[in-house]
Amino acid sequence: MEYISTRGRAAPVSFSEVLLGRLAGDGGLWMPARWPRIGDMGGKSYEEAAVHLLASFVGDCCGIDDLGADVRAAYAPFDVPQIAPLVELERGLYLLELFHGPTLAFKDIAMQLLARLAARELERRNARATILVATSGDTGSAAISAFGGLPRIQIVVLHPRGRISDVQRRQMTTAPHANVHNVALEGTFDDAQALVKSLFSDRDFADAMSLVAVNSINLVRILAQSVYYFTALAKLGGPARFVVPTGNFGDIFAGEAAQRMGAPISGLVAATNANDNLVRALRDGAYAVRGTQATLSPSMDIQIASNFERALYEASGRDSIWLATAMEHFATERTLAIPRLVREALTSRYLARTISDAETLATIGDAFRRWGRLLDPHTAVGVSAALGLVSTTGAATIVVATAHPAKFPETVTHATAVVPPLPARLRHSYVGRERMTVLPPDIGRLRSLVEARTSPHER
Ligand SMILES: *Cc1c(COP(=O)(O)O)cnc(C)c1O
């Protein structure tokens, strides 16, 4: 399989380049040259399903035995054998629980695997790398958990200071590994993301530091996430609509990817908090950025949903000439007009719903009373959207549960008067000394920090 850029002006690359986070020189995102057809996953374990799906993508990067070993190692730290269990809430309504990994959010599912594949590839190349990532909370802890302590790798994580939960912060800052460096940035997630993007787009610097991107624009994460759409449907034994709490549009695009690979998905619903420019884009045909608002679901406090570019690419019939022009306009003007045909293609696949903080709290309370279940605020955004949908087809609805309630105890306790317990195996974690550097949103300061932290062996 070759990988091509959404903007059409970069030479195609192999899987290992995509894996190690090489950015397309034309500013676009990598996509597989075509979507393979993946058969039914019925009867396969989660690990077998992952190997079966990813085997179509990894090319000559690793053999099937190595892939199998990495998949098994990635999912060994999960606390349930199903990895992503499907739980019935009431007739026709299900939760797909993706929070059974080491940091209690769905990002572990892709990151644990990405880390193993990347470490294997660095070993093969006898190379080193520095991972640089901006986080709205969960990506950073998933990356630190996956890459902390791995040889050949340094990891620098920026989070927006004071805008993530205490559990999220402690999961990152108490990591004991010498290769982990946390930056508390004085700004929003979008500020942090913009700084990271500009260091990556300085090609000389990115090459000298061997920078690797592991945020959700890394296609390997999306491919790894498309596995659970297949396994959930196999478990259900029929088609379903998925409701996905959405920030950067990565998780829900993994649903589109699964659909394009043949999964019987009857619809995809993006559930957002007040940062709802996706909802307005589908409704009005204009994708426009406003200021980011802080909400009870901080991992979705994102205005620029990087992976929306992938959906636009597919919806335009892979028209990279239009997309390149539109994205360049968006970069300077902060607004993008979606042509009618592209919008129709998007709305035939996606619905989008905005859920307020008040609705999120009410849903957490209702879910506890109705089903005796504690929902984290991100999952509650999804459940709230699902309860507001009318089913025309009678198909089941699966809400993607993206985080464990214990990750956001303040909000859950506020809504239910119950303190969500940390899973037993994590009860003694996150209590060590916190290590982080506070930085203003200044590119020069960040550049120096990355230079200082990048392993001296590599320069
Ligand atoms: C990252 C995250 C999301 C949003 O996922 P995207 O792929 O960015 O759309 C939702 N919920 C939680 C808990 C997250 O960590």
Image: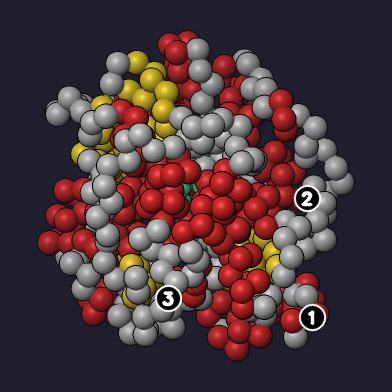
Q: Position of residue 411 (x, y in %)?
A: 59, 28
Which residue is labeled 2 in the image? 175
Contact between marks 3 and 2 (CB within 8 A): the answer is: no
Please report whichever mark, 3 or 2, sits nearer to the chain's N-terminal start: 3
In front: label 2 or label 1? 1
Q: Which mark is residue 14?
A: 3
Nearest to the eye among marks 1 and 3: give it.
Answer: 3
Image quarter of residue 131: bottom right
Q: Whole-percent x and y of residue 431? A: 82, 38
Q: Residue at x 51, y 26 (%)?
A: 375
The percent position of residue 403, horizontal first and vertical second, equals: 54, 36
State how the image is colored: secondary structure
**Dot 1 lies on which element?**
helix
Could you tell whether 68 is left or right of 226 in the image?
right
CA separation in Å, label 1 and label 3 = 27 Å
Residue 376 visible (yes or no)? yes
Q: Picture coordinates of residue 195 (x, y %)?
A: 59, 71
The first of marks 2 and 1 along the sequence is: 2
Q: Quadrant of residue 219?
A: bottom left
Looking at this rendering, what residue extends furthest in the bottom direction? 204
Local packing at callout 3 (Cα closer than 10 Å; few below 14, some 14-19, many 20+) is: some
In the image shown, does 348 or 142 lie closer to the viewer? 142
